[in-house]
Image (cartoon, rainbow, N blue to C red):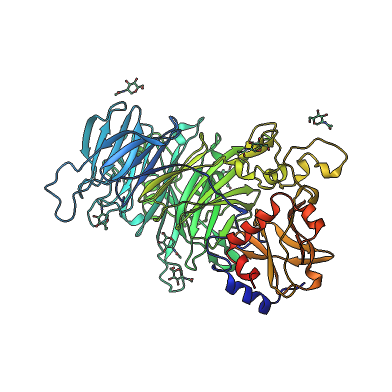
Amino acid sequence: MKLSQSLVLPFLALFPFALSSEDTPTFGSRNIPRLLSKDVIRGTLSFPFYQNHTLLFYHEDSGEMYVGGTNFVFKLSLDRFRMLEEIHLEATRQDHCQEGPCENVITVIEKFGDSLFVCGTNGHRPHCWKLANSSAEVIADHDGTGISPFTCAQNSLSLRVEGDLYAVAPLNIDGSCLQFRRKAGSRTNVWMYDSWITEPTFVSTSWVKRKDDPENEKIFIFFREKNSDQNPEADPWISRVARVCKTDEGGSKRFFQNTWTSFLKARLVCGYPEESLYFNRLQDVYVQHEEDWRDTRVYALFTSSWNATAVCIYSMQTIEGVFDNSTFKDYDKPVPEPRPGTCVRNSRALPLATISVVRDHPEMSDWVHPVHYSAPFYVSNNNYTKLAVDRVQAADQRVYRVLLLATDSGKIHKILESGSEPFIISQTQIPSLSSIQSMKLDSKEKKLVVSSAEKIFAVDLRSCDEYNESCANCVLARDPYCSWTTSGCTPTVPEGIQNIMDGKTSVCPASTSEHNQVNRTRRDAASAADVDLLTLPPVPVGVPFYLTCPIDSYHAVYTWKHGDQSSPCLQMHSNCLLLIPAMTPESYGSYECVSEERDYSNVVKRYRLTDRFDQRAKADRGKASAVAAQTLWITLGLGVSLFSK
Ligand SMILES: *[C@@H]1O[C@H](CO)[C@@H](O)[C@H](O)[C@H]1NC(C)=O
Ligand SMILES: *[C@@H]1O[C@H](CO)[C@@H](O)[C@H](O)[C@H]1NC(C)=O
Ligand SMILES: *[C@@H]1O[C@H](CO)[C@@H](O)[C@H](O)[C@H]1NC(C)=O
Ligand SMILES: *[C@@H]1O[C@H](CO)[C@@H](O)[C@H](O)[C@H]1NC(C)=O
Ligand SMILES: *[C@@H]1O[C@H](CO)[C@@H](O)[C@H](O)[C@H]1NC(C)=O
Ligand SMILES: *[C@@H]1O[C@H](CO)[C@@H](O)[C@H](O)[C@H]1NC(C)=O
Ligand SMILES: *[C@@H]1O[C@H](CO)[C@@H](O)[C@H](O)[C@H]1NC(C)=O
């Protein structure tokens, strides 16, 4: 039977909710989450009051997570998800606060050896504190200008490299003199030359280590700045990667003292160059470090003026290739030696010619293009704001990368990087009224921690229970965190069954319905024989009726089979319906809801419709059927109104 629009509409009027809501994906397409995760939030901690700004800091070496808010910082215990060692840090002096409450919003948390280094707005007078590890004791404190911003709305970043602190913060209360500097530690303080950047927003900074060549290590800075192209067609923003050498101590006393002598910048391209269509507004960056710096990858999230978002992936080797080999923009004289931007042992002894090129032409002519044929890895209409990337070792011993993307409305998408194709494994909704302010990945514990104005949440990335129904469910999920074993779908073990590459279920033990062997797991239901036939209470001729089937996978195609007829299914939230406008003698009999995904076909539901109670139906009726049918109607809130006619 075919469903025409005119038949469908009267039915919809009976439903108390809309056909598809914003929170439920429309099934049958690949560019949507395969399923909606439930019960993956393993910890929630509420703040005592609303936080305008929260900051998460994850210290990889120790596996410690710290949380900073207004007037406090605390260590978070990830296994039991509770607060450890809360430290109160109020503004040092209350008298200088002219207007509003004199709050100290924590904006910087770094760890130096055993001590914790914390800075905050301190009532518009940035200040830093050094805290002993075991106690909350302040062992030193000093002025924080240039390290912490004056208000939490201002741009700021911090980075620890060996014993040095690098920071982005404005020098003035109005937000001006915002730039990237080395601000404290054993090396000289160094800053930028004013004309290098225009109205920047700094997004991320990262230290890329080189085990065999530490002198050549660089610090990368990712930011967007105002486009100097005044053409009204031109995008207002341009996204950049810049770098400085770790060993850079600035120029000599006579020239470029305390100014980066190694600064270079290049354009980060994400889009379709043939169509001149670019995602220009850098939003977030996650640097996935590898043992060999050449394999390190930069995952960058961009937004665009037409409200689409994109993720582009860059290789560190390509980025360094541009800085090492490109010509300098608007500079056509011979390139001096050493080449501008080269890391040297003593930057104060660099020749004038080299530093002059850095001063006047720090931009590379070549652009940095992403891997994967220079195209964006993933383009979406979701308004993503935060990005993290995990490496997961699968049962086949290969390492897969999983992207974790958060939207402005608190959805988290778990996306498999499968070659050059994204595969959206699942969507989790964070139950918070406000947007996500900070997000940090604990790759050791496989937890993603997010903070909002009200709460902190921990998302368990290895919540495999949701695919526990059968081996096929577990394999179709293509979730590298999960594999099928004799105890169900569990966190990946080397001998687990998995097929991350193509999700084909042929890797699963064959099911009993094939009758040729018995090696199957108890709940491995793949055929009609395993699904209870529900005989519904009789439905008279002429009455409209509907059947419903739960959607487990939004990537599957669902079909209703009745005799030799096949009907598409109509999605309503997480259910798939078959609408019967009016029962006719042909409408009676059995119905199957069949889902098809990749190589897997599954009977999800079976119903029998009768026009009177008969003995056969009674015999068939499983103990659950009558109750199930009633519950079904009540759940959907219309069974009675249809049936009482
Ligand atoms: C949070 O921000 C609002 C508006 O910007 C301000 O009125 C309020 O004082 C701030 N609260 C704190 C604790 O900083
Ligand atoms: C920090 O902790 C370590 C080990 O827990 C301890 O050895 C050290 O003395 C502590 N340092 C301070 C300043 O308390
Ligand atoms: C983008 O989103 C903003 C804010 O929601 C809206 O005002 C604007 O019209 C949108 N632009 C396009 C091209 O859809
Ligand atoms: C850059 O130049 C060096 C030598 O000058 C070469 O070895 C390297 O392959 C080049 N890199 C790229 C990305 O072209
Ligand atoms: C996307 O989210 C950001 C951050 O919440 C917000 O400022 C922006 O307006 C949103 N864009 C659209 C198109 O909704
Ligand atoms: C998953 O399935 C297995 C076997 O079917 C069962 O033993 C196990 O308890 C299930 N786990 C959960 C969390 O439901
Ligand atoms: C079931 O599988 C186990 C281990 O894979 C194997 O040893 C056993 O022979 C199989 N049994 C049958 C009946 O195929």
Q: Is residue 48 above or below residue 493?
A: below
Q: Residue 31: tell me if it is visible.
A: no
Asked whether 607 or 131 is in front, the reply is 607
**138 horizontally vs 357: left or right:** left
Q: Position of residue 340 (x, y in %)?
A: 43, 46
Q: Is residue 478 above or below residue 518?
A: below
Q: Position of residue 397 (x, y in %)?
A: 67, 34
Residue occupying the point 71% across, 47% down: 503
Asked whether 19 or 543 is in front, the reply is 543
Q: Is residue 188 above or below residue 404?
A: above
Where is the C terminus found, in terms of image quarters?
bottom right
Residue occupying the point 30% across, 39% down: 73
Ligand 7's quadrant: top right
Asked whether 447 or 539 is in front, the reply is 539
Q: Position of residue 495 (x, y in %)?
A: 70, 31
Find residue 466 and report its image quarter. Answer: top right
Residue occupying the point 59% across, 61% down: 634
